Image (cartoon, rainbow, N blue to C red):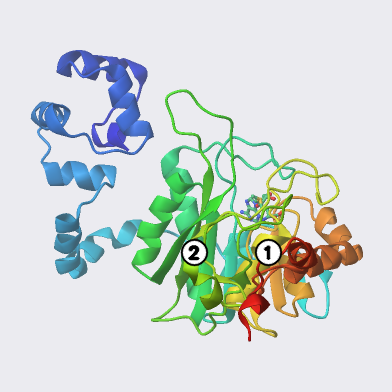
Amino acid sequence: MLFKALQIDNTRQLNLFAKKTGIALKRLQYYNDAHKMPSGTDLEIILKETGLSEIQLMLATGCLNQALKSLLSENAAHISRLLSPVEKKISSQKDMKPVFKTDLGQLYQGDCLDLLRGIENDGVDLIFADPPFNLNKLYPSKINDNLKTSPYLSWCEDWAFECTRVLKPGGSLFIWNLPKWNLHMAEFLNSMLTFRHWISVDIKYSLPIRGRLYPSHYSLLYYCKGEKPDTFKPDRLPMGICPRCHGDLKDYGGYKDKMNPNGVNISDVWLDIPPVRHAKYKKRNGSNELSVKLLDRIIEMASKEGDLVFDPFGGSGTTYAVSELKNRRWLGVEIGPVEGIINRFQNIDEDRLNLEQIRKDINCLIPEKHYQKRLDQGLWTPESFRN
Ligand SMILES: C[S@@+](CC[C@H](N)C(=O)[O-])C[C@H]1O[C@@H](n2cnc3c(N)ncnc32)[C@H](O)[C@@H]1O
């Protein structure tokens, strides 16, 4: 973005600009690639050298502050007249046919944007999106997962905009991504939807990196359309119990008798979502498969039986399988191979068993597997306080 604003088209021009301004090449490259507005002395030098105003540079780099946003909004009619010739051309809607169906759901193969553009307004109750993270991963679909920041975010805005359009008033939208991308998505969604939560899901997602904190959580954005969601029924979780000795992991002091026997409230930090690494649970080769537990929690919290759930990035089909098992209608699309998803449905009893096990251990303070063991050891249970 910065190079475009400075009319730098090639390395020779870049070297020249760096030499003239004394700004290190590396820093100029960073401003451009990371989509940042220069500040301090660099900004002063750039403005002086180019004759641009600060507002011009902000507009050209797309780094707008609140004051500029207000100015744009005050002059919306005039600006939109100026911009109308370059407004985005929406590609025409493609006629897509489902490649797989159940009584509750339909799966399509293709680009989610093509499918989305054919979906009517305000019809979906819950959307969960787990897009590629632009980490240069090799997906079975061979999509380009190594875009520059600006085209990646612009693509994310396109599908998030469409998701917002098809979401019912009162419906909920969840987006799973790295914190660095969800920061941008939150800013984009804030202008259309109501922010509910930034949920931190504790899963280590890469090896420790020198000079950085160990990346240890994914971001799960939770928005709703309109003032509040039609459905908000979070499960309750068991208290922390040591899997070996079955004792309390936390000291509840004098509050034990006040604890809800149905479990503790779910917070916005989720520590109990397992990564899908074990071959037994993996539905396709490679990574990027989310756990049934995560989708169960989201679908349970923000939809009811019969509701329509949409996931624009099928992958191994976790959202669709969990929706099916929980009696939600579902709509799915995957740009790459879909055989893995179809096979998953052929063996859906595996997911059913997994889901049953997951649900057995929630909505109670002490799961069955610990209960008797605690009694045997004379440890407290909610019943200890009943007269
Ligand atoms: C991170 S994975 C989703 C994993 C999924 N949540 C699961 O649990 O298995 C992202 C998926 O989106 C697919 N994808 C990428 N671009 C797409 C597009 N434009 N339309 C539809 N699917 C797309 C990729 O092929 C990949 O399978």
Q: Residue at x 47, y 23 (%)?
A: 210
- Element under label 2? helix
Q: Report the side of 94 relative to 228 (left or right).
A: right
Tag 2: residue type?
Gly
Q: Residues within 10 Å of mark 1 (few under 14, many from 20)?
A: some
- Pointer 2 or 1: first along the chain: 2
Q: Report the side of 167 relative to 82 (left or right).
A: right
Q: Residues within 10 Å of mark 2 (few under 14, many from 20)?
A: few
Q: Position of residue 249 (x, y in %)?
A: 59, 54
Q: Which residue is mark 1?
A: 379
- Picture layout, residue 265 above or below residue 200: below
- Element under label 1? loop
Res 338 visible? yes
Q: Residue at x 41, y 80 (%)?
A: 226
Q: Residue at x 71, y 79 (%)?
A: 328
The quarter of the picture where residue 381 lies is bottom right
Q: Which mark is residue 102?
A: none
Q: Is mark 1 within 8 Å of ligand 1?
A: no
The quarter of the picture where residue 387 lies is bottom right
Cα–Cα gap, marks 2 and 1: 14 Å
The foreground one among 299 and 239 is 239
Image quarter of the N terminus? top left
Q: Which residue is mark 2?
A: 253
Do callouts 2 and 1 mark residues in contact (Cβ within 8 Å)? no
The foreground one among 367 and 20 is 367
The foreground one among 155 and 292 is 292
Q: Position of residue 238 (x, y in %)?
A: 64, 66
Q: How many marks?
A: 2
Tag 1: residue type?
Leu
